[in-house]
Amino acid sequence: MIEEVVLLDVQNRPSGTMDKTLVHSGHTPLHLAFSCYIRNERGEILLTRRALCKVAWPGVWTNSVCGHPLPDETLQAAVSRRCQYELGLPVENITPLIDEFQYYATDASGIVENEFCPIFAAFTRQPPAPRESEVMDYQWVKPEDLLSSVRTTPWAFSPWMVLQLGQITQKNLSLLG
């Protein structure tokens, strides 16, 4: 089955679709994505380390889950689907944090991310069971420790997470919900 991502025009409106395996390259078109920060009962945030087989940013620590909604899929449904697929986690209370986040970044191999990427928070009561092809490691961290680490060693994290956390803290939004 071909998984398609939603391409966007300059006003961030859907303008077509493209095979997910072809979209990320050195000339990635603008497309729709999402990021989600999952918290647990202790108020900790789940960080994940991307699998080494990932096309973009392999082995990099990042937010809990990222992904692309399928054509005609709501962002909340996509968040739920990818949390289950990547982490084996059912989530609840999927809440938008920032509706209009967009970034452009190039990894060391030349792969470009060019995404309009709303940011969500979600909650789980279960431990992750990561899919090896998606996540090579994970860690639950206190929000204040995450923010401190990103401030002191931004190079150790995905560029989108560094930018997202900057906007989340600027807007005084709580990752704890």
Image (tube, grey):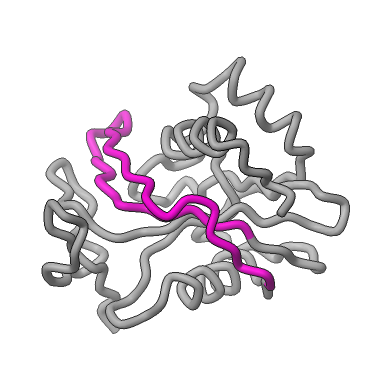
Residue 88 screen position, x and y as percent: 65, 71
Q: For the view shown, which residue lies furthest in the front direction?
A: 171
Q: Residue at x 25, y 79 (%)?
A: 2
Q: Residue at x 58, y 18 (%)?
A: 153
Residue 156 screen position, x and y as percent: 54, 26
Residue 164 left/right relative to 94:
left
Residue 67 screen position, x and y as percent: 42, 61
Asked if residue 110 is among those painted magenta in the image, a careful observer would answer yes
Residue 154 left/right relative to 127:
left
Q: Main secondary structure of the magenta part?
A: strand
Q: Which one is nearer the viewer's eye here, 126 or 38?
A: 38
Q: For the view shown, which residue lies furthest in the top direction?
A: 152
Q: Residue at x 61, y 52 (%)?
A: 37
What is the quadrant of residue 105 in the picture? top left
Q: Is residue 71 above or below residue 8?
A: below
Residue 176 screen position, x and y as percent: 74, 49
What is the quadrant of residue 144 in the picture? top right
Q: Which one is nearer the viewer's eye here, 9 or 87?
A: 9
Q: For the view shown, which residue lies furthest in the right direction?
A: 42
Residue 42 left/right relative to 27:
right
Q: Quadrant of the N terminus?
A: bottom left
Q: Which one is nearer the viewer's eye here, 76 or 157?
A: 76
Q: Is residue 98 above or below residue 103?
A: below
What's the magenta region?
A: 92-121
Asked if residue 32 is among those painted magenta in the image, a careful observer would answer no
Q: Residue at x 26, y 65 (%)?
A: 20
Q: Is residue 125 above or below residue 36?
A: below
Q: Is residue 147 above or below residue 38?
A: above
